[in-house]
């Protein structure tokens, strides 16, 4: 009879676990299901996925993911997160370029993290029901919406998932001495490190657990297999990172001091998740509230008497250990863009939930169910509503930047970015309003002037465009630490001056640019255009040669050099250049026209007719193509065709050259 009762109790426990796990899957799944239909935000997610889909869609590039930064850029100046890149490759292979699959896998990894947290809390001695409610709260907490709903938050979720699994496997090995858990630990630890660099703090957590919670302070030999693997993995991480990337100097102690408000702010937002933003800045309210909270918690921990006090301290150390490394990172634009990102609280906050679990487990053990239902159900309901509403901020680029502006009306970056979206969609007045507000908020922010110049350029108003590009260059030069246009400010301003035929100013401007940014292909190309327009064709050729030497994949460079060769009557070289241009881009109409004209000079009249016909197919109103095709027909004594083509050229307003 006693055994039967024991079996029934065990059966009830198993049912509770299954129900708990089902709820931990269904609740975040239902709450966040709508994010699967969201678009890219046109921020980091588009930069990573849309701009590099060819790379991501080919699994043969999996090993090359370890040779790239997180943005897959040629410069390699981003962060080193190859596991994140590989997960994006899986997404791209399954669902193509559609954002739905990328959003789904963010949600899937989040749910797996929630389940991992549930088992971690239980392993640390927190009772089943409390572990369930805390994990459920983590699954819907509005502070983590950023990581789940924004595709670029993938690295934080992966670090949270593999970090939790790594710690769980260490505890399991410590309890059972089963070597399979050592293998699990090594695999998940490596995955965590290569998912996000802040995971290097994991050994700190594990050593504290081993020494102070398991009281193995003098059993260092037991840690040697782990420490050996940790050291090898971390050295491998930095070796590969330094070999394949050219990271900028983004770490500084000054940044750490400036980022100190991150700790109290994130702790406050754990408790009061209001006013959340995709691009938050430091505020006095959250900072002050957080400082008061930290002082109160510290005082309480000192007085707190419990057998599990060390685990509570472990939770606090977990939070701090994973927050501190990111505090040394300098945000280039700072206040003009964001001071920190909420998604970075994902992994550190697991420690807060662990500490909260130990505290509540001690306090509510006698009236557990009643208190849990009275407290957690309303909080989970309220937080779910907040998270559901806030997730709309990641529905698309307009929603993303509008959400930022709603919480910070002086965010120059968000205003400027939304203005660009308006500009692309032809909403000129709305775009100008956002650009003007961006300039009003931060008068020395060069991006707003630059984008306003681009808008006027698209409207064909080159004089006003020149004015704003000049302003952009001025502030970009005067305040390089907060602006990042760099050579583009020179290039676009020179393009406007080319349109206004200010060729001497172009040459003076770009010679300065070349000294500052040597080897930039666009600078040499625009210099070539200026010299060409001044009929200094040999100087133009020299500049085009330098442009092509720097990048042999730009078809317009070959076309431009071909025109310079044509003008000095080097028709064979000109023909070769136009051939290269068309090899790179067979749809480039100008190259078809120019190659056809060059073939006329080389007496290849049939070839000229074919090329010029192709050009006319692209643009039937191309008067010069009609004219030279008429000349080619004339050379072949096809007078009717010649007259028809020449007549068409006249109708299109093409004026016959006097020497023809």
Image (cartoon, rainbow, N blue to C red):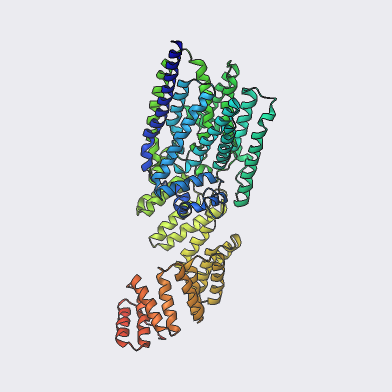
Horizontally, residue 516 falls left or right of residue 100, namely right
Horizontally, residue 155 falls left or right of residue 324, namely left
Above or below 11: residue 622: below
The residue located at (48%, 77%) in the rendering is: 575
The residue located at (47%, 53%) in the rendering is: 58
Horizontally, residue 538 falls left or right of residue 603, namely right
Image location of residue 117, percent across then percent down:
49, 29
Q: Is residue 405 visible?
A: no
Image location of residue 388, percent across then percent down:
38, 34
Image location of residue 447, percent across then percent down:
48, 52
Above or below 593: residue 193: above
Locate the N terminus by quadrant. top left
The residue located at (58%, 36%) in the rendering is: 183
Image location of residue 124, percent across then percent down:
54, 23
Farthest residue, direction top: 1
The foreground one among 368 and 658 is: 368
The foreground one among 267 and 460 is: 267
């Amino acid at each position: 009879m006693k055994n039967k009762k024991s079996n029934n109790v065990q059966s009830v426990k198993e049912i509770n676990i299954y129900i708990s796990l089902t709820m931990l899957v269904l609740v975040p799944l239902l709450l966040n299901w709508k994010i699967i239909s969201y678009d890219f935000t046109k921020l980091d997610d588009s930069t990573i996925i849309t701009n590099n889909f060819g790379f991501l869609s080919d699994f043969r590039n999996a090993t090359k993911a370890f040779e790239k930064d997180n943005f897959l850029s040629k410069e390699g100046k981003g962060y080193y997160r190859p596991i994140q890149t590989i997960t994006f490759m899986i997404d791209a292979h399954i669902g193509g370029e559609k954002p739905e699959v990328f959003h789904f896998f963010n949600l899937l990894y989040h749910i797996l993290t929630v389940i991992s947290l549930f088992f971690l809390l239980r392993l640390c001695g927190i009772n089943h029901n409390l572990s369930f409610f805390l994990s459920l709260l983590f699954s819907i907490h509005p502070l983590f919406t950023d990581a789940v709903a924004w595709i670029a938050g993938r690295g934080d979720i992966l670090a949270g998932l593999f970090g939790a699994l790594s710690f769980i496997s260490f505890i399991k090995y410590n309890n059972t001495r089963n070597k399979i858990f050592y293998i699990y630990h090594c695999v998940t630890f490596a995955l965590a490190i290569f998912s996000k660099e802040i995971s290097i703090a994991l050994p700190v957590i594990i050593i504290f657990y081993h020494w102070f919670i398991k009281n193995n302070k003098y059993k260092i030999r037991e840690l040697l297999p782990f420490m050996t693997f940790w050291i090898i993995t971390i050295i491998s991480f930095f070796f590969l990172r330094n070999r394949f990337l050219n990271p900028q100097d983004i770490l500084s102690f000054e940044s750490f001091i400036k980022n100190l408000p991150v700790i109290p702010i994130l702790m406050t937002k754990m408790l009061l998740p209001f006013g959340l933003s995709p691009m938050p800045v430091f505020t006095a309210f959250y900072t002050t509230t957080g400082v008061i909270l930290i002082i109160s918690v510290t005082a309480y921990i000192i007085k707190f008497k419990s057998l599990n006090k060390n685990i509570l301290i472990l939770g606090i150390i977990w939070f701090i250990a994973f927050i501190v490394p990111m505090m040394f990172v300098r945000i280039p634009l700072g206040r003009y863009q964001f001071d920190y990102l909420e998604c970075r609280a994902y992994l550190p906050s697991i420690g807060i939930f662990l500490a909260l679990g130990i505290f509540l487990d001690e306090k509510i053990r006698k009236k557990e169910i009643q208190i849990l239902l009275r407290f957690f159900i309303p909080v989970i309901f309220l937080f779910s509503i907040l998270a559901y509403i806030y997730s709309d901020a990641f529905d698309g680029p307009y929603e993303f930047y509008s959400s930022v502006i709603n919480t910070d009306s002086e965010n120059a970056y968000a205003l400027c970015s939304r203005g660009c979206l308006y500009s692309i969609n032809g909403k000129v007045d709305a775009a100008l309003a956002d650009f003007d507000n961006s300039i009003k908020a931060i008068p020395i922010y060069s991006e707003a002037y630059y984008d306003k110049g681009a808008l006027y350029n698209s409207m064909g108003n080159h004089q006003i465009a020149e004015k704003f590009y000049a302003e952009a260059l001025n502030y970009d030069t005067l305040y390089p630490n907060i602006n990042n246009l760099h050579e583009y400010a020179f290039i676009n301003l020179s393009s406007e001056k080319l349109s206004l035929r200010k060729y001497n100013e172009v040459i003076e401007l770009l010679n300065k640019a070349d000294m500052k940014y040597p080897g930039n292909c666009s600078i040499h190309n625009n210099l070539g255009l200026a010299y060409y327009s001044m009929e200094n064709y040999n100087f133009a050729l020299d500049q085009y040669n330098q442009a092509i030497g720097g990048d042999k994949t730009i078809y317009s460079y070959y076309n431009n050099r071909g025109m310079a060769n044509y003008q000095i009557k080097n028709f064979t070289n000109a023909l070769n250049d136009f051939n290269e241009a068309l090899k790179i881009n067979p749809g480039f109409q100008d190259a078809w026209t120019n190659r056809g004209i060059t073939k006329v000079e080389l007496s290849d009249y049939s070839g000229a007719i074919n090329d010029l016909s192709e050009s006319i197919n692209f643009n039937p109103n191309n008067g010069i193509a009609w004219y030279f095709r008429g000349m080619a027909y004339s050379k072949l004594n096809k007078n009717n065709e010649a007259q028809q083509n020449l007549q068409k050229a006249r109708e299109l307003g093409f004026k016959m050259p006097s020497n023809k």
